[in-house]
Amino acid sequence: MTRPMRKARYIVLSMVLIPAFFLVGCAAPRPVPDRSCESESILIDAHFEGGQMGTCAVRGEGQFELTLFPEDAPPINKSPWYAFRVSGQHGDKVRIRMMFEDGYARYWPKLSRDGETWTPLAESQVSTDEEKGWMNLELTLDQARIFVAGQELLTERYYDDWLDELESHSEVSTRLLGNSVQNRPIYLAETADRPELVLLIGRQHPPEMTGAISMRSFIQTILGDTDLARRFRDRYKLAIVPLMNPDGVAAGHWRHNVNGVDVNRDWGPFTQPETNAVRRWLENAEAGGMELRLLLDFHSTFEDLFYTQPVSENPLDFASRWLGASAVRLPDFPFKHEANPVSEQPNAKNYFYTSRGIPAITYESGDETSRGQIESAAVVFAEEMMREMLK
């Protein structure tokens, strides 16, 4: 199926988005975030996909205070997202204090001059107090505008490029899986039908960029031109949903879609179109005779780790064998394996394990782990996963 035409750029977003989470699903009214704020010669704005600056107050020429707050109260997860553009003249000095309501400075600020290439700000430019919940930034403009964000902006253009990459593979086709609340497309990339199926989903939570980086490298390895990858694809069908929450990503949310619902708490209730799109497709595939064998859900957190089921609830213990083999090959990449009892929380891991009785694993990548390390480790994890599943 031909995809609907996608925009070529994501830097400019002409439509002002007022996220629905300020109207739906909150215990108390939340402020409407500002989209811009200016002193005499400096402008701060969030008029681009992924932009989020909370509320803004001018404290002097070139001095601003941003207050960042979550879309839910109290927040499920304290991951204050921020992404804004600072415009002025070459040499202008800018001071920004960020105040974190119901949170703290989880993400070290990154800077970009084009919205695509990002580097962490130097320690000399940043001061923070996690207990008091603030972070100060000292910036000097070296061009008309710069971007500052908690993580890289991986928005529409990134996923357009990724889908183009997937489509260029001779064994992969793509289709429209469903629509988000705001009618953004949710795409599926898939290989040929096989009796056994592996499902990989990503970006349920908007700020979790390192999970997206891991997922892309992991999938590139599975789709590679190696004997191992070809044998794996001969046995298993791959179903890939790279972007589960496109509205939340576009609006710069901490956690939710625009209905104020954490997508990774909707597996079971299925109240949202994003999770229902995957459920409907999977049930149709199963009705056609396919059997789901593995679910991998890619996320980000403070460190590199995998959440799995405990051995007592999964006697075959696929995860321990897979991750143990990977650890032997990754002596310089420390990661954790947390095998937790299954709870009633309706996340993807719990839902797919309890409903299908399969290994259902949350693959977490560290917020500040080197991106090169994330990519190279994902290659090893993918190879060892294939080896274990081919036994």
Image (cartoon, grey):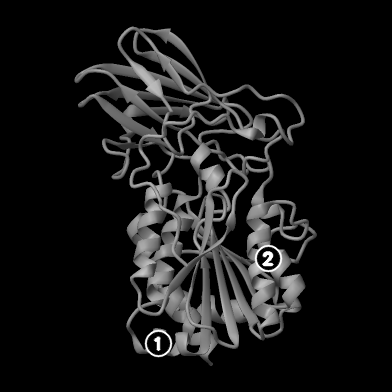
Residues packed near mark 2 inside 10 Å, few (<14), some (14 to 19) or many (20 plus): some
Instruction: Give residue 161's position: percent from left, percent from top.
Output: 35, 57
Inspect this view and state whether residue 143 appears.
Answer: yes
Determine which quarter of the picture holds residue 111. top left
Q: Nearer the viewer, mark 2 or mark 1?
A: 2
Q: Would you name the residue on which mark 2 appears?
A: 279
Q: Would you name the residue on which mark 1 appears?
A: 230
Inspect this view and state whether residue 106 appears.
Answer: no
* Residue at the image point whose x is 64% and y is 69% from the top: 281
Are discs 2 and 1 less than 8 Å apart at CB? no
Give the secondary structure at mark 2: helix
Instruction: Give residue 354's position: percent from left, percent from top.
Output: 76, 71
* Residue at the image point whose x is 30% and y is 35% from the top: 122
* Residue at the image point whose x is 72% and y is 34% from the top: 24
Residues packed near mark 1 inside 10 Å, few (<14), some (14 to 19) or many (20 plus): some
Give the secondary structure at mark 1: helix
Disc 1 residue type (three-letter): Arg
The answer to whether residue 193 is above or below residue 174 is below
Nearest the eye: 192 or 371: 192
Instruction: Give residue 213's position: percent from left, percent from top.
Output: 41, 58
* Residue at the image point whose x is 40% and y is 62% from the top: 163
| Residue reaching furthest to the right | 344
Nearest the eye: 287 or 370: 287
The answer to whether residue 101 is above or below residue 281 is above
Q: Tell whether 117 sits left or right of 178.
A: left
Q: Tell whether 355 sits left or right of 292.
A: right
Mark sitting earlier along the chain (2/1):
1
Q: CA distance from mark 2 to mark 1?
A: 28 Å
Instruction: Give residue 26's position: percent from left, percent from top.
Output: 73, 32
| Residue reaching furthest to the bottom | 391
